[in-house]
Image (cartoon, rainbow, N blue to C red):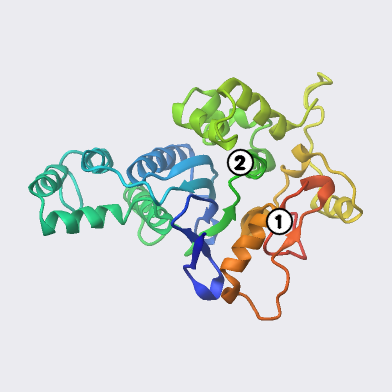
Amino acid sequence: MRVLRNQYRSRKRLLIDDQVAIYHIVTRTTCQQFLFGPEEREVFCNLLMKQADFSGVEVLSYCVMSNHVHLLLQINPEAKPSDPEILRRYENYYGAEKVPLSAYSASELKAILTEGGPTADKERARVLARMNDLPAFMRELKQRFSIWYNHKHENTGTIWSARYKSLIVENSPETLTRVAAYIDLNPIRAGIVTDPKDYRWCSYSAGLAGQPRARKALIQLFHGKREYKQAIAAYRLILFGKGYQSKGVEHKDRGTISAERLEEVIQQNGHVPINELLRARIRYFSDGMALGSKAFIQQVFENNRDKFGINRKRAGARLPPACWGGLHVMRDLKKHVYS
């Protein structure tokens, strides 16, 4: 049975303990300033992968924009690496000798773990506490990037908004692929490119470029039941929709529908193609608290019953079935769902 905790009770950030859990994370720059140019985005992607390797967190999808970042992360809390694996990750994270004053060098940590005893147990536990933990992962990733950014630009103070948003995502191919597509389509919505493969700092582009991590992550979206070629073909259909470029005319069918028109069509129970829907900014994917099947939302609600008012009867709400099939959301947003 899942055990969930609320990291910030008043703001209802739900986290799943003691079981594999997947989260859609959105973190923004302070005052939504456009701080990330090409070099900043490149450095962030590199730090993201290094942080993931150290912590054991799996990056299923990502997109780094100029003023915010989207991540789809899988946390594996029961994975306990061996001492050799801890040392490998530690040295890769810090380097052979250069570490903060508050941390041991890789050689010092190796000597401690080899000697054994209470000190080894203490230091092993301290390092393991930073692994497979969402708050620790986000804290260290943002801190490391802030240090680089402030040094690079001779800046002081924070560059991030205080909090990141987190959405619990059901571990099912239907939910995972749609959230990942929503992430990869960010540069399309922003009008930067007309095809996400042309945006260097997203997971879809990285996979097409041959990056092993990105290709493995794409296969994981389908629970490993497809080879890469089959997985990328199926995922591309979700991104663009069947027949998206079938007319063979440049820029044909590449437009977006306005938020007002989208709201109107959905309220009238009209069908909106998934490729068009995912190109809009949809608050369900960041503010919905949890996203998945009805049973998944019900279980999350029951395990967190004390976090909600006594008058609340329903676990969540079903998204418009003409557009979303069987997906449900925990927080039933009433206004400005699409923007």
Furthest-bottom residue in this view: 310
- Disc ID at residue 171: none
Mark 2 Cα-neighbour bin, 10 Å: few <14, some 14–19, many ≥20? many
Viewer-nearest residue: 238 or 115: 115
- Considering the image in quadrants, where does the C terminus appear? bottom right
Residue 40's quadrant in the figure?
top left
Q: Quadrant of residue 306?
A: bottom right
Disc 1/disc 2 C-alpha distance (Å): 20 Å
**Mark nearer the viewer, 1 or 2:** 1
The percent coordinates of residue 179 (x first, y second) are 63, 45
As drawn, which residue projects farthest toward the front?
A: 1
Q: Is residue 277 left or right of residue 4?
A: right
Residue position for label 1 = 294
Q: Position of residue 209 (x, y in %)?
A: 51, 23
Count of numbered badges drawn on the protein: 2
SS of the residue at dot 1? Answer: helix
**Location of residue 168 in the rendering, given as x and y in whole percent from the top left corner:** 57, 55
- As drawn, the label of residue 180 is 2
Residue type pointed to by label 2:
Ala
Disc nearer the start of the sequence (1/2) = 2
Query: Does the rendering let one see residue 101?
Result: no
Q: Are marks 1 and 2 in contact (CB under 8 Å)?
A: no
Judge from the rendering whether residue 277 lies leftward or rightward of residue 322; answer left or right. Answer: left
